[in-house]
Image (cartoon, helix red, strand yellow):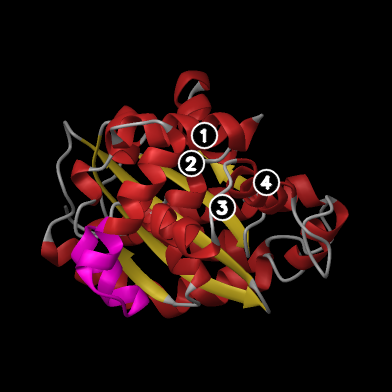
């Protein structure tokens, strides 16, 4: 795709002339539309979604281009609990910044995990990449660009072009969304107050009578890590991981990962 410099410079002009005293909802929409137009002048993609993440709190949907059906899958269902298993969310928890492809961040068994088969496959994406921008302590904004199966993955040259834009995107995001910590606090999800999803997730493990070690391992299983990967992350042997997994399955009376995911999401949302 050839860069549309006319559209790009018009977008940058709109950004520099955007009012700074707009209400929150209007400001979110204006910033999202500026990022949308800028990205479309540079590369081809199908949808954009911008989430703000704070620790384990339910992410805030700042902007998206989905129709009603896709909004239900990509936003409503996602916010209800699956985000806790999302590689993008896990990357914000690690405090990383920059631009990354989903496949760079996903665990080794992600694409064969029940999370992928049960939730992520509904998105029908060929590829997703994200700009990760820490905006204040504990809060990261992720600008996600998505290409559907019919469109295919981002070519290397387009990804390189987007990588060159990352410093500007980060500056724009930080300028527009500098007070997100207050929004999480307003919903009881930040600044010393436990968020609803954190409490719900903790209640799941307590209700299921899992030990801290069992809970840590099962969370990694659900994210798409193999036993070998879990062992490396937790500094324990692969055999120990497998013993804990068998114990959890026996304790819960299940025999498959799909049953495990079903129990987790049901209790998380209950």
The secondary structure type at the circle numbered 3 is strand
Badge 4, how many Cα within 10 Å: few under 14, some, many 20+?
Answer: some
Examine the rendered structure and indicate whether residue 86 appears above or below residue 99. above
Q: Main secondary structure of the magenta part?
A: helix
* Residue 268 or residue 195, whichever sits in front: 268
Magenta residues span 226-242
Residue that numbered label 3 is attached to: 51
Query: In the rendered structure, which disc, 4 or 3, sits on the residue that comes first in sequence?
Result: 3
Q: Which one is in front in this view, the residue at disc 4 or the one at disc 3?
A: 4
In the drawing, does residue 55 fall left or right of residue 107? Answer: right
Residue that numbered label 2 is attached to: 82
Q: Which one is in front in this view, the residue at disc 3 or the one at disc 1?
A: 1
Residue that numbered label 4 is attached to: 203
Residue that numbered label 1 is attached to: 265
Query: In the rendered structure, which disc, 4 or 2, sits on the residue that comes first in sequence?
Result: 2
Badge 3, how many Cα within 10 Å: few under 14, some, many 20+?
Answer: some
The CA span between labels 4 and 2 is: 16 Å
* Residue 172 or residue 148, whichever sits in front: 148
Give yes or no for contact between labels 4 and 3 (Cβ–Cβ under 8 Å).
Answer: no
The secondary structure type at the circle numbered 2 is helix
Q: Which one is in front in this view, the residue at disc 1 or the one at disc 2?
A: 1
Please report the residue visible at 24 percent of the width from the left and 69 percent of the height from the top: 161
Query: In the rendered structure, which disc, 3 or 1, sits on the residue that comes first in sequence?
Result: 3
Please say whether residue 30 is one of the residues in the magenta stretch.
Answer: no
Instruction: State the image quarter where residue 31 is shown.
Output: bottom right
Badge 1, how many Cα within 10 Å: few under 14, some, many 20+?
Answer: some
Q: Which one is in front in this view, the residue at disc 3 or the one at disc 2?
A: 2
């Amino acid at each position: 795709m050839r860069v549309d410099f006319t559209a790009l410079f018009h977008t940058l002009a709109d950004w520099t002339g955007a009012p700074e005293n707009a209400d929150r909802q209007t400001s979110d929409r204006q910033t999202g539309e500026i990022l949308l137009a800028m990205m479309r002048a540079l590369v081809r993609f199908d949808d954009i979604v911008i989430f703000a993440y704070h620790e384990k709190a339910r992410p805030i949907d700042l902007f998206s281009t989905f129709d009603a059906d896709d909004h239900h899958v990509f936003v409503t269902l996602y916010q209800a609990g699956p985000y806790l298993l999302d590689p993008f969310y896990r990357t914000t928890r690690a405090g990383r910044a920059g631009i990354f492809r989903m496949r760079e961040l996903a665990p080794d068994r992600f694409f064969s995990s029940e999370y992928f088969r049960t939730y992520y496959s509904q998105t029908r994406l060929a590829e997703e990449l994200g700009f990760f921008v820490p905006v204040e302590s504990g809060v990261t904004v992720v600008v996600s660009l998505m290409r559907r199966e019919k469109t295919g993955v981002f070519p290397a040259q387009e990804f390189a072009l987007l990588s060159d834009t990352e410093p500007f995107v980060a500056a724009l995001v930080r300028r527009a969304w500098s007070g997100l910590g207050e929004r999480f606090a307003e919903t009881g999800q930040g600044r010393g107050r436990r968020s609803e999803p954190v409490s719900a997730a903790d209640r799941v493990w307590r209700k299921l009578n899992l030990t801290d070690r069992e809970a840590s391992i099962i969370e990694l299983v659900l994210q798409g890590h193999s036993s070998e990967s879990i062992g490396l992350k937790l500094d324990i042997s692969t055999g120990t991981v497998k013993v804990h997994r068998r114990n959890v399955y026996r304790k819960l009376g299940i025999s498959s990962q799909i049953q495990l995911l079903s129990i987790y999401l049901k209790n998380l949302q209950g």
